[in-house]
Image (cartoon, rainbow, N blue to C red):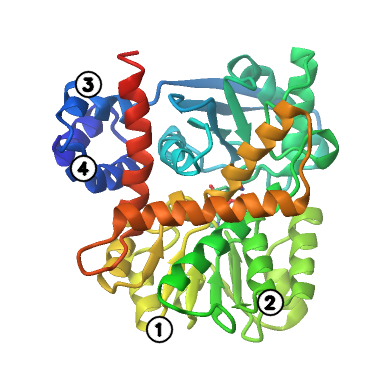
Amino acid sequence: MKSEEVLAQLKRRFPNEPEYHQAVHEVLESIEEVYNQHPEFEKANLIERLCIPDRMFSFRVTWVDDKGQVHTNMGYRVQHCNVIGPYKGGIRFHASLTPSILKFLAFEQTFKNSLTTLPMGGGKGGSDFSPKGKSSAEIMRFCQAFVTELWRHIGPDTDVPAGDIGVGGREIGYMFGMYRKLTREFTGTFTGKGLTFGGSLIRPEATGYGNVYFLLEMLKTSNIDIKGKKCLVSGSGNVAQYTCEKLIELGAIPVSLSDSDGYIYDENGITMEKLEYVKELKELYRGRIKEYADTYGCKYVPNARPWAEKADIALPSATQNELNGEDAKKLVANGVIAVSEGANMPSTPEAIEVFQSAKILYAPGKAANAGGVSVSGLEMTQNSERISWSTEEVDNRLKSIMKNIHENCVKYGTQPDGYVNYVKGANIAGFMKVAKAMMAQGIV
Ligand code: NDP
């Protein structure tokens, strides 16, 4: 396999899908050497079979707003690969959503889920519906309309969706309710459910907490204590909030948050009390992060991201390609020692190059944010067994999964000079498990 040739062919077959090409490129580049040590993989054309999703559904979603006006949006589900378990991956509601973004997310999800050690395949779905400014009744009608199309394609052993950008506990509740009504069954087909109807403790916290657990493992390799470290966090949704929570708990100092309008920089540090304000602002009032600056009198920069601010650690937790090569240079020049990604593919290839050349600790989202889907996997187990585990039990399992993922990255990503290339480590570890399962199951 020559990664450049495979990529060129994919670009010809699927033009105008830049995010998908970007994600495939990163994986192919890092697995090329290992792949070519297995001629049986090439004969079975594993690479094309792994780069192209099993199937992708697209459908029209029609819904009515509070004024009686009818709207249409596009809905999608990408079922990428189910060789090691049912398709599994979140649902994103965002105006900018395209099939390319969903294909990149489902592709990444396949390797991420493989890394978790749990039996889950990869998928992703969503809509170009924007939840911003919509009433709760409009959100409910949209979720119901979306599931009216989606429900035929999913199931507890087929495909299990969860949340992502624009889809949290409220939306999962509405989608699960409609799914239950249509199927007349109560199964664990969605994860991220409310605690009173099959949800798992620690699921809302899992991605943010898991990212910090992964960061701790990375810091340990360099004997660095997280206490007192200033951390730049982007985003202000689910992942950003629980990243901050765990950082504060461990004595680190988160100093920034952002949304699509701008970022706040609080040099005194975001405390638990201020974080509670953010949670209410975002989950209850659905407000903008600027209001934090108005309330606490700190710096607010519109239409910008926090990467030029001085800090020790960066945890991008908003969206893809939110940190470019120039941002990365500023972070490194300001003395950042570690970057751990809560979001999926937040750093551009140029930014990754800067981090790795500077030999700072850098963890890709595929490894660092796998805690979310891991606890989703644990929610599926609890649902199948019709039991629920305690907070401590789930949190301990999450910690041990993140530790395990870190060990695998070190195993496959350590360079001759001792530097750990976490991108390579995560890609090879994730790929090898899927590849072996594909070989064992024949040409299907
Ligand atoms: P939320 O919807 O809860 O929050 C997303 C945050 O990112 C918001 O602050 C939002 O601001 C900001 N954001 C979204 N899109 C953009 C954009 N195009 N430009 C600038 N800011 C943007 O989502 P999550 O916290 O759940 O997800 C954040 C990231 O983490 C995503 O990359 C997601 O794929 C990834 N992830 C999430 C997991 C989960 O369990 N939820 C699991 C693993 C990864 P605004 O409100 O202004 O749009």
Q: Of the residues tagged 3 and 2, which is closer to the observer?
A: 3
Residue 203 % position (x, y): 69, 47
Q: Quadrant of the C terminus?
A: top left
Looking at the rendered structure, which numbered label has been put on residue 334?
1
Q: Of the residues tagged 2 and 4, which is closer to the observer?
A: 4
User: Closer to the N terminus: mark 2 or mark 1?
Assistant: 2
Q: Mark 3 and mark 4: span between their CA atoms? A: 15 Å
User: Closer to the N terminus: mark 3 or mark 2?
Assistant: 3
**Callout 4: SS:** helix
Is label 1 in contact with label 4 (beta carbons under 8 Å)?
no
User: Closer to the N terminus: mark 1 or mark 4?
Assistant: 4
User: Closer to the N terminus: mark 3 or mark 4?
Assistant: 4
According to the picture, the residue beneath numbered tag 3 turns out to be 44
Name the residue nearer the viewer: 413 or 338.
413
Looking at the rendered structure, which numbered label has been put on residue 270?
2
According to the picture, the residue beneath numbered tag 4 turns out to be 34
Q: Mark 2 and mark 1: span between their CA atoms? A: 20 Å
Whether residue 321 appears in this view of the structure is: no
Q: Mark 2 and mark 4: span between their CA atoms? A: 44 Å
The amino acid type, in three-letter code, at marker 3 is Ala
Q: Mark 3 and mark 1: span between their CA atoms? A: 47 Å
Within 10 Å of disc 1 (Cα), the crowding (few <14, some 14-19, many 20+) is: some
**Callout 2: SS:** loop
Q: Residue at x 69, y 72 (%)?
A: 249
